[in-house]
Image: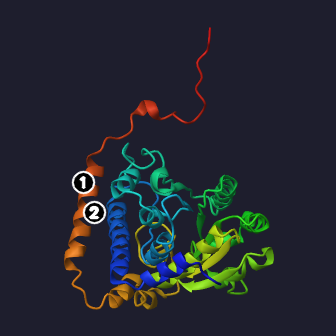
Amino acid sequence: MSLNTSTAVSLAAASDQTWLLARWREMQRIRRAEESIGDMVETGEVHCPCHLYIGQEAVASGVCAALTRHDTVWGGHRSHGHYLAKGGSLEGLFAEVLGKVTGCSEGRGGSMHLLAEDVGILGTVPIVAGTVPLAAGAALASKLRGDGAVAVAFFGDGSLEEGHIHETLNLAALYRLPVLFVCENNLYSSHLHLHERRVKDNLSQAGEFHGVPGACVDGNDVEAVFSAALEATDRARRGLGPTLLECRTFRWRGHVGASSDVDVGVHRRGELAEWLERDPIARLEQRLNGLDLTPELQAIEDEIRQALDAARHAALPAPRRLMSHVWEETTCAN
């Protein structure tokens, strides 16, 4: 794939220590936030179901580093990392999972319904692959407006078993929509391993029948993810249509909740120890050539603590707002 000059320059900059440090900060911020939420789940302070992103941070960070503020991101039930990597606020996330009015969805959505229109987070939902067609719709709107924006749909490996993903791939290819499909393959759909659900391990080829090129990248290597995402978004902005990226990674916690290596009460196959050695943050630290990251980490922990404190002290939504947004309210002219 040939790249335009600005994209080539961006790829070169990705090896710069400043860029690498920014990605490290972002990934640590996501992990520390998720660990805090996991702690609150275990103590019972958070009551809504929480699907944690720990272990997959390089995917969100690498993809979102290739985006502009005007590009849109659409996520699923495990999207805290996407929200933060695209610019969502820590306090907005913490307040939302705590059901507070200062949450990014005003305390109405909880962990799985995140919104930050100002930075392009237009929706995360627990319905499997539910936002994938919406991302294609956003891409179609962008193409009609001619504003150069790209839409990104994040989804898990289990989502590729949903029919409307294939309908969306076909439509996006047919109209050459500026959309990037990012499959975060963490090998498990709830408690079922990939090989318990599929004959072939070929998710990156899922778009080929529809004319959508695909690539499989190391989802624990933030530079590799960024490079692939930048090429794909460059292709989309030049009117050449969608791309499917399969990012191979692994979630350290269970499907839902804070437990390690247990999915809805079922123990996984014991791969966690192997994947801990592929920690995306530790791998990036090796590229930072021995920098003393202690002050940076302390600053992140202070930021987490302050945001969490603010969220805990925020007000709960007023009971009278319970039925807001349920039906259209009109005023009679009599």
Q: Where 178 falls versus 326 (above or below)? A: below
Q: Residue at x 60, y 63 (%)?
A: 150
Q: Where 205 falls versus 102 (above or below)? A: below
Q: Residue at x 45, y 81 (%)?
A: 222
Q: Amino acid at mark 2?
A: Ile
Q: Where 115 falls versus 302 (above or below)? A: above
Q: Which residue ends up furthest to the top in the rendered image? A: 334
Q: Residue at x 45, y 70 (%)?
A: 53
Where residue 250 sits in the image (x, y, percent)? 50, 81
Q: Residues within 10 Å of mark 2 (few under 14, many from 20)?
A: many
Where residue 21 sits in the image (x, y, percent)? 33, 78
Which residue bears the numbered disc 2?
A: 304
Q: Quadrant of residue 162?
A: bottom right
Quarter placement of the C terminus: top right
Which residue bears the numbered disc 1?
A: 309
Task: Label 2, secondary structure: give it.
Answer: helix
Q: Nearest the camera: 281 or 108?
A: 281
Q: Is 135 positioned to the left or the right of 19 in the image?
A: right
Determine if residue 98 is in view: yes
Task: Label 1, secondary structure: give it.
Answer: helix
Where residue 176 sits in the image (x, y, percent)? 74, 67
